[in-house]
Image (cartoon, rainbow, N blue to C red):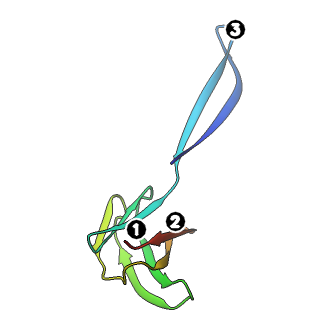
Amino acid sequence: MISLSFTIVNAKLNSSPLITTTFQQTPKAAYQDQQLHLLGVEGPGVIEVYSIIGNKIKEIKVQELDNFKSNLELDSGKMYIIRVTVSNKVYTLKIVTP
């Protein structure tokens, strides 16, 4: 899913309004073939994996989160919470293992 946000700037160029567009991708997490995949965030950060009842399963410190993949053995058929901290922002994502 891609989240779009538009910004209209009240500047004039040749008597017509100038419109700028900002595209923002929502972070996504997926689990496939015992690998955790993360998309939509960049830079150094920390990934924490929690069970649905709040027990921390794993913490991964990463230098570059762009197209992140990591081997991770999780029980099948369960829901997990993925907490990603990057640039003083925290994203909370859910995954359900196959």
Where residue 37 sits, quadrant-wise, is: bottom left
Q: Give the residue type that dot 3 points to.
A: Ser
Tell me the tag on residue 73. Answer: none
Numbered disc total: 3
Query: What is the distance, in whole Å, between disc 2 and disc 1 at their CAs?
Result: 8 Å
Q: Position of residue 33 (x, y in %)?
A: 26, 70
Q: Which residue is drawn at 35% across and 73% down?
A: 62
Using a 10 Å C-alpha cutoff, classify the residue at mark 1 as few (fewer than 14 neighbours), some (14 to 19) or many (20 or more). some
Which secondary structure lies at badge 3? loop
Label placed on residue 15: 3
Upstream in sequence: badge 2 or badge 3: 3
| The one of 20 and 3 positioned closer to us in this rendering | 3
Placement of 82 over or under 42, stated as above or below: below
**Residue 56 percent across, percent down from the top left:** 48, 89
- Check disc 2 and report its element: helix, strand or loop: loop
Q: Residue drawn at (56%, 38%), measured in percent from left and top?
A: 22
Mark 1 to mark 3: distance in Å? 44 Å
Say whether residue 12 is left or right of residue 89: right
Residue at the extreme right: 10
Circle 2: residue type: Ser
Label for residue 44?
Answer: 1
Above or below — where is 82 with respect to 65? Answer: below
| Earlier sequence position, callout 1 versus callout 3 | 3
Residue located at (30% from left, 82% from top): 73
Q: What amino acid type is highlighted by mark number 1?
A: Pro
Q: Residue 90 in the image: state x and y as whole percent.
A: 57, 69
Residue 92: percent from the left, percent from the top? Answer: 56, 70
Question: Badge 2 is on which residue?
Answer: 87
